[in-house]
């Protein structure tokens, strides 16, 4: 029978390898580099600009995108060629392995054995009988050997044919890869199979596949630990690990931006990496801050750039690993992190926190780590929710006797602020905290009421800026309106809850020298103002159940009592009060403009909402001022002054927004987007109130007459802009002389001219807005109804606002 000689290929791997090297040489010429290019391009993550020589970059014709395309083509060709060399090498290895199997089987007669020919000792055989028995055994052996040889040949030929077919498939694959070029799928294949390393990332950045595999993670983590603990000085190998984590971070940013998941291998790498680091992950972060390691040696903190890069890479990786939308999840986080939210710690009772020193230290370390993360990355919903839910407990430690962490640092709320800056990036987590749709983690977690009470009454070092992130997303464009509405309803319901242990009481009378929320944390009041302005239509509306606060069917309902209380929380900060009052005034003017442009009919649709909203604002301002001053007259004056500041502020806003719309003519025009415009204007003004408070020329306080006459002048202004009243017909007592804002506001009319201005406005509005008096009457009634609801508790503060006496309506 013939021997075994499977089909071979003439291709030589060494020659193919040299062809791959030629591709790298071309890449070197493109980049202006010499030397061994394969290792430089694939060995570690780096920026493309670091690969291109300064001579090339200095050329006038240099265009980074063109150079990327050219170098990518060369590197890709090298990768495909290297892949083919590996394919041929693997085929030849397999062929030699099959030949070796044949030779080994042949040496052992393919497993055939000769039968014994000698019989038992008692059997007497003649020579002929012995010979016959031997011949028979030889013949049987030959038949067995031939059969087993055929079986072996058949099996090995089958494997050889499959190896040949595989080689043909690989040849076809490599040909297709060359024909298609460096598509994402082809690059991913080359990276996953080791034909390319970091080169695709170094050329194309975050969109390229990364050569990170879970099998590498343990060794990388063990190596990094030696650097973090000071056993090894930072060197090129250290830089490679941090560069790899940074590359993963950039890919996470890109995938999150595009709504895509991370490669499972990358997530597996991160999971194994952090799991291997274990407790060192958090301890290192604390000591790195001061540069002191547990053994007294200098660590990365002695080199701030290394410390920041390391913490940024490690913190960002944790966020990616926790993010469900990237393919991660809370359960994939390392145990050392999840332990902070577990049941191993028992929350302090009766003021004692002994034995829990490690918990706040771990919290502070995690806050330090996450605080360095890239701010474009978002942690997962469960992780972010848990971070917020345990923060109140950390703040208890800040105020306790156990206030110190390793390195002689003191616990402070700066760690909590860092944590909240990160945790509140996740809108769904914010929604969960506000609505209570979460399970408090372990013994250290708090429920919604306690979370909000702590966040909003604690005197933050950053004035509440980080805690404001819990609500600062609600007013922004592009948010999920259902989430925003549900979160707003839950927020209002929780923070306006009265009573001894209610959040409202805690926020209007904090432990900080009886100051309100906005006085100690102005950023929180400003965030509340943005929320209120977004929903001014809902704050102004009537609803079937006056005591109902909720969000259903796309509509926000706010209990009448909750409206003024929420406005009161806004009013604690002068800038926020101004912001809200300006929004209310824009709302009013927008309504009055629509009333005039629509022909001055349908008064009830416009007047009552204006009055209700103004009354809730007045009540909120007065309540806040009464809480702050304890004096009715001073409170009324203060509230009026803040409204006048808002009018001064709003005049520029209205002139800008209305003026930019162009001539009104006969076309129905409205002040665009109350919330957006007020917010945009505030970005420029930075919530700064005028340095000098503006008082009315005649010295009178803001009063009910102001609301009526201000409405009349606003309607005249709308009629002039709409062409219903020619400007030449407007008496001088109402004119400013400014074409951009031709009609005076009420506070711009001299006190001695008020009656004359009122009469002039009446004459002009009779034809331009026939139902204007009905609108004013609706305003009167609606305003009194609302104010009566609040005035019963402190009637002296409301006397000048409620004309017909203080009476609490039944709805209250």
Image (cartoon, rainbow, N blue to C red):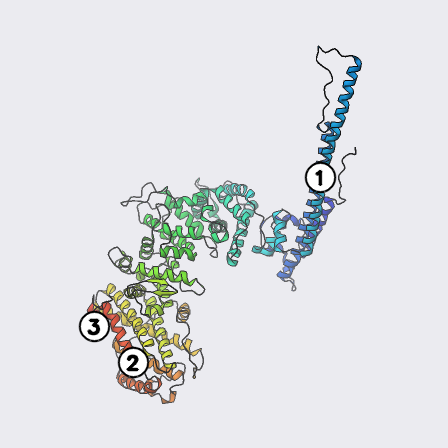
Of residues 205 and 338, the one nearer the viewer is 338
Q: SS for tag 3? A: loop
Q: Is residue 31 at least partly visible in the picture?
A: no
Q: Are marks 1 and 3 in contact (CB under 8 Å)?
A: no
Find residue 361 and report its image quarter: top left
Label number found at residue 774: 2
Of residues 798 and 457, the one nearer the viewer is 798
User: Gap between marks 1 and 3, in whole Å?
Assistant: 103 Å
Q: SS for tag 2? A: helix
Looking at the picture, how far across and down is residue 334, in whole percent?
Answer: 46, 44
Is 665 on the left or on the right of 101, as rendered?
left
Of residues 768 and 108, the one nearer the viewer is 108
User: Gap between marks 3 and 2, in whole Å?
Assistant: 24 Å
Instruction: Name the quadrant of the N terminus.
Output: top right
Label number found at residue 158: 1
Label number found at residue 589: none
At a point 32% along the width and 86% down the height, the residue shown is 766
């Amino acid at each position: 029978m013939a021997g075994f000689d499977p089909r071979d290929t003439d291709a030589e791997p060494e020659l193919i390898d040299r062809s791959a090297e030629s591709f790298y040489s071309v890449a070197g010429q493109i980049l202006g580099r010499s030397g061994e290019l394969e290792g430089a391009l694939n060995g570690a993550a780096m920026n493309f600009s670091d690969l291109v020589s300064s001579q090339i970059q200095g050329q006038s014709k240099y265009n980074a995108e063109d150079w990327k395309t050219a170098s990518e083509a060369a590197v890709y060709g090298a990768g495909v060629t290297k892949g083919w060399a590996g394919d041929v090498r693997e085929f030849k290895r397999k062929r030699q392995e099959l030949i070796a199997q044949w030779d080994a089987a042949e040496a052992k007669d393919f497993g055939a054995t000769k039968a014994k020919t000698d019989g038992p000792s008692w059997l007497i055989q003649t020579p002929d009988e012995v010979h016959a028995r031997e011949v028979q055994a030889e013949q049987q052996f030959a038949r067995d050997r031939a059969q087993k040889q055929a079986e072996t040949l058949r099996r090995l030929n089958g494997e050889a044919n499959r190896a040949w077919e595989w080689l043909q498939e690989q040849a076809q694959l490599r040909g297709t890869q060359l024909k298609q070029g460096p598509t994402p799928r082809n690059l991913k294949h080359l990276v996953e199979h080791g034909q390319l390393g970091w080169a695709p990332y170094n050329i194309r950045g975050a969109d390229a596949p990364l050569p990170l595999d879970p099998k590498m993670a343990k060794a990388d983590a063990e190596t990094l630990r030696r650097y973090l603990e000071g056993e090894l000085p930072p060197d090129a190998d250290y830089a490679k690990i941090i560069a790899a984590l940074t590359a993963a971070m950039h890919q996470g940013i890109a995938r999150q931006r595009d709504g895509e998941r991370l490669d499972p291998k990358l997530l597996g790498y991160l999971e194994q990496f952090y799991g291997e680091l274990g407790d060192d992950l958090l301890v290192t972060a604390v000591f790195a801050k001061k540069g002191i390691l547990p053994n007294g040696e200098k660590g990365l903190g002695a080199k701030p750039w290394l410390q920041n890069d390391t913490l940024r890479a490690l913190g960002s990786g944790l966020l990616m690993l926790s993010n469900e939308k990237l393919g991660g999840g809370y359960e994939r986080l390392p145990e050392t992190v999840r332990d902070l939210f577990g049941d191993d710690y028992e929350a302090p009772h009766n003021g004692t926190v002994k034995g829990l020193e490690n918990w706040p230290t771990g919290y502070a370390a995690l806050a330090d780590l996450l605080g360095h993360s890239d701010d474009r990355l978002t942690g997962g919903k469960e992780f972010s929710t848990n971070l917020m839910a345990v923060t109140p407990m950390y703040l208890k430690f800040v105020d306790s006797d156990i206030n110190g962490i390793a390195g002689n640092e003191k616990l402070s709320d700066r760690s909590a602020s860092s944590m909240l800056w990160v945790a509140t990036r996740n809108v769904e987590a914010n929604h969960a905290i506000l609505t209570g749709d979460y399970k408090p983690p372990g013994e250290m977690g708090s429920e919604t009421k306690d979370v909000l009470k702590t966040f909003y009454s604690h005197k933050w070092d950053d004035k509440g800026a980080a805690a404001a992130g819990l609500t600062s997303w609600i007013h922004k464009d592009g948010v999920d309106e259902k989430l925003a509405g549900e979160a707003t309803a839950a927020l209002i319901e929780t923070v306006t809850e009265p009573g001894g242990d209610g959040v409202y009481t805690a926020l209007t009378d904090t432990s900080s020298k009886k100051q309100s929320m906005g006085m100690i944390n102005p950023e929180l009041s400003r965030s509340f103002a943005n929320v209120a302005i977004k929903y001014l239509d809902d704050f102004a509306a009537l609803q079937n159940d006056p005591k109902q606060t909720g969000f259903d069917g796309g509509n926000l309902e706010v209990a009448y009592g909750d409206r003024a209380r929420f406005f009161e929380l806004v009013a604690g900060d002068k800038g926020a009060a101004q912001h809200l009052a300006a929004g209310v005034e824009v709302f009013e003017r927008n309504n009055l403009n629509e009333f005039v442009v629509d022909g001055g009919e349908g008064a009830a649709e416009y007047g009552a909402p204006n009055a209700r909203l103004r009354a809730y604002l007045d009540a909120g301002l007065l309540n806040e001022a009464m809480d702050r001053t304890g004096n009715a007259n001073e409170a009324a004056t203060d509230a009026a002054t803040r409204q006048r500041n808002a009018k001064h502020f709003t005049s520029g806003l209205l002139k800008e927004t209305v003026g930019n719309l162009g001539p009104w003519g006969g076309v129905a025009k409205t002040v665009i987007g109350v919330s957006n415009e007020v917010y945009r204007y505030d970005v420029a003004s930075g919530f700064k109130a005028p340095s000098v408070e503006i008082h009315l020329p005649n010295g009178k306080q803001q009063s009910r007459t102001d609301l009526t006459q201000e409405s009349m002048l606003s309607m005249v202004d709308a009629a002039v802009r709409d062409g219903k009243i020619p400007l030449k017909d407007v008496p001088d007592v109402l004119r400013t002389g400014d074409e951009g804002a031709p009609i005076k506001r009420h506070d711009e009319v001299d006190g001695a001219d008020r009656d004359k201005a009122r009469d002039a406005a009446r004459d002009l509005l009779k034809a331009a807005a026939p139902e204007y008096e009905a609108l004013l009457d609706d305003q009167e009634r609606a305003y009194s109804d609302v104010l009566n609801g609040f005035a019963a508790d402190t009637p002296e503060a409301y006397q000048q606002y409620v004309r017909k006496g203080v009476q609490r309506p039944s709805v209250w």
